[in-house]
Amino acid sequence: MASFGRFIRLAVGACAFLLVIAASVPCNAQQVNPTASSVKEQQLLQELNRIQGRVSIPDQRSGVLEQPAGRDWREFRNVTLRWIGGIGILGTIAVMVIFYLTRGMVRLESGRSGRTIVRFTAFERFVHWMTATCFIVLAISGLNITFGRPLLLPLVGFETFSEWSQWAKYAHNYLSFPFTIGVVLIFLMWIAGNIPNKVDVDWLKRGGGIVGHDHPPAYRFNAGQKAIYWIVVIGGGAVAVTGYLLMFPFYLSGIEGMQLAQIVHSIVSVLFIAAMMAHIYIGTIGMEGAFDAMGTGEVDLNWAKEHHSLWVEQEQAKGHTPSGSTPRPIAAE
Amino acid sequence: MARMKFLCDADRCIECNACVTACKNEHEVPWGINRRRVVTINDGKPGERSVTMACMHCTDAPCAAVCPVNCFYTTADGVVLHSKDLCIGCGYCFYACPFGAPQYPKVGNFGSRGKMDKCTFCAGGPEADGSKEEYEKYGANRLAEGKLPLCAEMCSTKSLLAGDGEIIAQIYKERVMKRGYGSGAWGWKTAYRETIES
């Protein structure tokens, strides 16, 4: 009987053991992770800093699932750019004010002669003013995007600011076309006079004669004007290209391309604005007689001799005589 | 107050796109705009995974931070909404958004950008709750009716969860405990700077 009892105990024990095994087998199967080999979010982000896949909707560009790079762009747009723009533009204004107060207007040493010489033709002046007008509107509407929210919005309120910004955006978009045409025309019509040469080295060594009463010789464009020319051509080209990338999203670049385009567009723009303020200063209150070049197109002969001595010699060699007390050059030709 | 969040349990998403369809239908979203989409990574290869994504209604939302006209606002429930009356369609929120949520109807200059449109967590916009104007601009305001976003409500595998962050995180944790695995809450680290231990 004792052996039978042992057998029963063994049998019961075995059955119980089998039950435990049987019960545990499907249980273990449930614990298997069917997606264990699948991609992991953090791993993908570490590898590429973006997660991309396939979408079944027609909008294929929505296949970018995550792009945390937008965070860096946010930092640039809200902090870095405001510092660059603020220092660049306010710094230029400060330098101009200090310069004006210490040096004052650069006067004509020998006064006005009353005789003038043609500096810019009507077409040249038209291109200049078309580009300049567009530039000012583009600059104000662009600065509004970067600085409007902290500076202007609290003053005028949400509705007014949005209405103004909407129109500013339209202006920014549409005026980009005449501006781009202007930059191309400026590039073509003034390239001949803007190739750097040896005279520029001497001009730069003497600081353009802007401090003191020096007048280093220069051809039609001095080194400072050549610098402005290349800033307009290269800077204008850069803002035009990056601007169109932003204006026509996804035609040529994806989201990361547009972030980069905005960074280039905005940095070049604020530096461009700073440079153009200096250009406006020297062309107006900074120098006596300079505005006539783009105003009437004819500058005083003494101004030309003081600032562009070599150019005057060239013009006179070509037979372009000054006008004023004598008949106009057209009649003289 | 609740802090509304989305959570996609990627181990359960079967890429049926019902959430996408439900959203489009509920809000009569214009042609060409998808407030929600399903992205399949490694499609057809080993390790394939599908995740549904819309606006995550981020904490410290990047879109709101970069908007030049400050047209975004966060509701008491933590839902990030915007005013289409103030939006100028500049595209900046789209550059900053980590999830590609903002989209623009092709009606603006040169057909590039009209007023931005994005997921509202079925919470409408600044207009009066349930008004005709609100529906036309932003779609249905289900939250005001005491309902949760339709995409999550009708998810066939209950992969997509929407609701108070703490509650959906708890549901997800229980799932992970029970089945023994989980791939984490996709996008949470980027959107909310937190993860769910799994």
Image (cartoon, coloured by chain):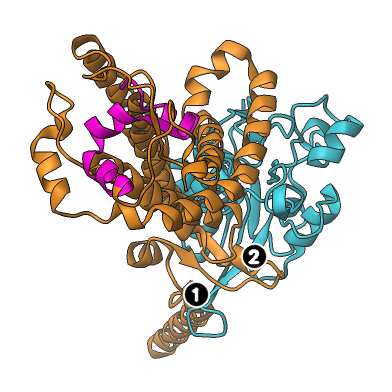
Chain colours: A orange, B cyan
Q: Secondary structure at mark 2?
A: strand
Q: Residue at x 33, y 19 (%)?
A: A112
The residue wearing badge 1 is A35
x 54%, y 43%: residue: B92
Q: What is the number of the mark on residue A51?
A: none
Query: Chain ID for label 2?
Result: B
The segment highlighted magenta reads A287-316
Count neighbours of disc 1 (C-alpha within 10 A) and say few if under 14, some if 14 to 19, many if 20 or more: some
Q: Between A305 and B121, which is closer to the camera in this rendering? A: A305
Please tell me whether mark 1 or mark 2 is closer to you in this view. 2
For the N terminus of chain A, which image quadrant?
Answer: bottom left
What kind of secondary structure does the magenta stretch mostly adopt? helix
Q: Is residue A36 above or below residue A188?
A: below
Query: In the rendered structure, does residue A192 fall within the stretch colored magenta?
Result: no
- Asked if B28 appears above or below A78 in the picture, the reply is below
x then y, percent, for residue A281: 35, 24
Q: Indicate whether residue A311 is drawn in magenta.
A: yes
- From mark 1 to mark 2, how far is it between C-alphas? 18 Å
Q: Which mark is residue B38?
A: 2
Residue toward you, A134 or A130: A130
> Above or below — where is A125 with respect to A45?
above
Residue plotted at (64% across, 51% down): B161
**Kind of residue sitting beneath label 2:** Val
